Image: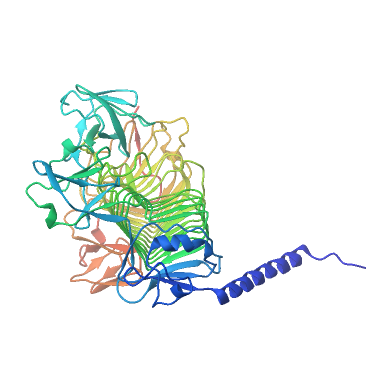
Amino acid sequence: MNKIKSPIAFLSKSFSGFILLLIFTFLSNAGYSATYYISASTGNDDYTSSQARDQKTPWKSIEKLNGFFKYLKAGDSVLFKRGEIYYGSIVPSKSGYVLAPIYFGAYGTGIKPEVTGLVTLSSWKEVKKGIFETPCNVAGTDLLINNRPQQIGRYPNAGYLTIDSHAGNGTITDNQLASGPNWSGAEIVIRKTRWIIDRSAIISHNRNTLTFEGNSNTPKNKYGYFIQNNINTLDKLGEWYFDKQKKTMCVYFGSYKPSAVIVKTSSVANLVDIRRSNYITFEDISFTGSGKNSFNIIQAKGITIKNCSMVNSGAEAILASYSPFLSVQDCLINNSLSGGINLDAGCINASISNNTIKNTGLMAGMGKSGTGTYEAITSFGDHTVIEKNRIDSVGYNGIYFGGNSASAKNNYITYFCLTKDDGAGIYLGDWSKTTNKRVEGNIILHGIGNSSGTDRVNSLQAEGIYIDDNTESVNILDNTVSLCANNGIKLHNAKDINIYGNTVFNNGVQLRLEQDHYLASSKYIRNNNIKKNTFFSVNTRQTAAKFSTNQDDITSFGRIDSNIYCAPKNTDFVRTKKLTASNYAGAGDTEIRFEFNASNEAKIIKLSSSYVDVQNNRYSKTVTLSPYSSVILIASDPGTINNFPMIEYSAVINKTYEK
């Protein structure tokens, strides 16, 4: 009698066969893989493909590579000679395999080979006092002087003008705006909310009213705007303007000679443009001066970018859409005008690790319009891991992420919300329901905030970790947050959030739970667990914890126990719209020392006197910090140790409800 085979056994056999097929395919292709060489100095595009496999007879240009791309096979390599510069855009038109990607790398000795979109401008002539122009056939989105990005010409040179009134989303009136010069054809930059800076072309200028191309974001009265991209804005060294009609680049040099500096502008939109080609690896290459993105990746699977540099990107260093299994590791990203790494929800299973991202979105009006801009890392794909990145100086959020089972772990983020605010070092705001997100072991310092161009110039809204409206199912574990202008950890209309083991030190408010339910779709703050954290304020202007609600339901926020709170003694409550809630413990004049370790190795810190931490553990000569951890140390002696003013609460913080 024939027996029916087990489905499990059948599947196991099929899977094993599939793996064997993959290995066989990989080995077969590996045996026939080839390496092609490119050298800008010694190459010749007339060489045959066979000759280009020899370092002595390489090709010369990216143009030759793009023409040959369709003949590349899985497992093939293309190597650029180190220390040389290559102009143009790499446009892949062939895919590799998962075990045999097409590989782009470097050969020889010296610095990384450089792929650039920059052209040098010369032949300057003075057209107005201090303003020089030169022919320019490309509409560059940025301009560099001696490799430093320059601000597009703007009026005024700093800050914002004020909107007195507006009509719809395409007209504003400023009673102080002069009728001349006429700004028609220039660009208006409007701060429409704390978190949106929009750019629009000006259609007409009539007295003190500007009409411009509108979008979905409506201006607000008493918010700010400025004008850019017009020759009449050029009055500061380095400011520039591209005249589309005359095809000239105009730059203000004042009394300086243009010939004394090197001026470059971008002439290539995307330095790597991948569309529907899969399994391609880039390693050890520098990409500089893209008009838009250093990498533009559309519907491409298994792209790896490793140990590359992306510098002076006109928009994002990496922009990817519907491209799963993207890996970005050990890269340097510097001076991106709009964003560092931007991945949409279709980029599932992405890995962003060990990168350094600096100076992102620091020029207002030079980034893209709308939300999700001026950010170092933006990612919404499921199962994405954002780990061990170093983010320094960013215009808005350091990391804005979402996606089911996505995580941000062991990142070091410092100086953020420099251009716009109501953002955070790490920000989560769900526009669709996702679950099981983790924020773990991050070091977050220096949330600055920028109120210029808003109606509340004395308010700096920079949070350390911000869980915003409608977000749920987030674990916030073992993070360190310090020196943020507004709140260390903030929950806004969020639910099912676990906050365990965090150290929150020296922020405006250490823990903030805010329920305003201003939208019909807003969630109530419910089912949150906040345990075993330290919330430490250092002066009377700071609050250890502040809760607010639009109704008397604060006890429904969740369970809050076994936390340590510290703040100087103060008899006043923290007042909100309807609720006041706070707890204080006096810190007096006790010396407090805050140390952190934002590295992968243990860190030993020498101590000159005796200290205790908030758990009353004693330290005399040294304290050892494990990777991505911190400690608050209080100077102590045997007579004062037991009197240190800390309070541990095992229940919901006291509240006063105002009728």
* Relative to 219, residue 84 above or below: below
Image quadrant holding the N terminus, namely bottom right
Residue 253 visible in the picture: yes
Q: In this view, which residue lies farthest toward the right?
A: 1
Q: Indicate the quadrant where residue 188 lies.
A: top left
Image quadrant holding the C terminus, namely top left
Residue in the image at 32% along x and 26% along y: 170
Q: Indicate the quadrant where residue 6 lies.
A: bottom right
Q: In this view, which residue lies farthest toward the left?
A: 255
- x, y percentage for residue 276? 52, 54
Residue in the image at 16% along x and 29% along y: 181
**Viewer-closest of 589 and 377:** 377
Residue 646 visible in the picture: no
- x, y percentage for residue 108? 35, 76
- x, y percentage for residue 477? 41, 57
The colouring scheme, among rainbow, by chain, secondary structure or one colour, is rainbow
Q: Could you tell me how many numbered marks the image carries? A: 0
- Judged left or right of residue 168, residue 633 is left
